[in-house]
Image (spheres, rainbow, N blue to C red):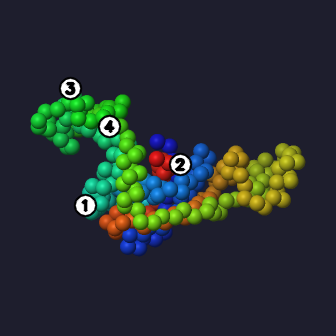
Amino acid sequence: MTDLYAISVDSVEDATVTGRVHLINPDAVMICPDATLPVELLTDAWWLLSMGYLTDAEPEGREWYPGSRAQVRALAGGMRGAATFCRLHDYLLGETVRVTSDGYVLTKDGKQVVEPRRKSADVHELSWGSGSDETSDYVTTVRRPDLFRNEVASIVRAHELGPLLQVPSWSDVAEADFARAPFEPDDEREDMRQWHDPVDLDYGPAWDYMSELPLHRRPYAMWTVTMADASYVEHVAIGMRWRTAHTGWV
């Protein structure tokens, strides 16, 4: 999936997390204000950690978490909220069901057939997703955004999304455009050098300008969520950062 936002975490206190949603994709200039967004982000972070994808391997990289691959996988698997986030992930993307070549349901490790023997289509509502890996064949259940939203309502105590900050001005974009092509005459661009209001983020050259900026200088909005219990944020660390295709629009 295409990365739509960059996420960073500023603070974690008891069951409350505060972070930033950074704009990195011109196709995602709106940020969902609903409680589904922070829960999707916490779920995404849990999944990345459970797979060992979010580590301290590249301190200056686009993604970072304070722990080795083995450490983050153990953390995600052992935290008190692991079962909840596994369920939420399945609601969002569909559950992966391991099966034999003729469709009988296997245990989650793919090593033996579940008794009594049943075909996946008889016990699950399946999507078109299927495939195989080094463990076994698998199929995927349908997504359940309704169940995701219901669970969000039960585990979120408060949430807030702030305004979009640090949007460059029209003049910033015009100056950068002149620097790239100083000898191309353009009256509109010359006028734009005097405009100091925030640029329209649907204006293409704005993204040419922002693509050259480091993450900390790009537009962002602050997000805060307070969960029902601190067990839901045991995997969140100050300074962690990652990129996501999740939007909150469930």
Contact between marks 1 and 2 (CB within 8 A): the answer is: no
Res 52 seen here: no
Q: What residue type is labelled 2?
A: Leu
Res. 27 image quadrant: top right
Res. 171 image quadrant: bottom right
Q: What residue type is labelled 4?
A: Thr
The residue at 44%/63% (across/down) is 240
Which residue is disc 4 drawn over? 141
Q: At numbered mark 1, what does the secondary structure look like: helix, strand or loop?
A: helix
Left or right of residue 201, residue 142 in this image: left
The residue at 50%/48% (across/down) is 249
Which residue is disc 2 drawn over? 4
Q: Residues within 10 Å of mark 3 (few under 14, many from 20)?
A: few
Q: Which of marks 1 and 4 is nearer the N terminus?
A: 1
Which residue is disc 1 drawn over? 78
Q: Which amino acid does label 3 sit on?
A: Asp
Please provide percent x and percent y for residue 222: 55, 64
Q: What residue type is labelled 1?
A: Gly
Distance between the alpha carbons at the discs numbered 4 and 2: 25 Å
Which residue is disc 3 drawn over? 102
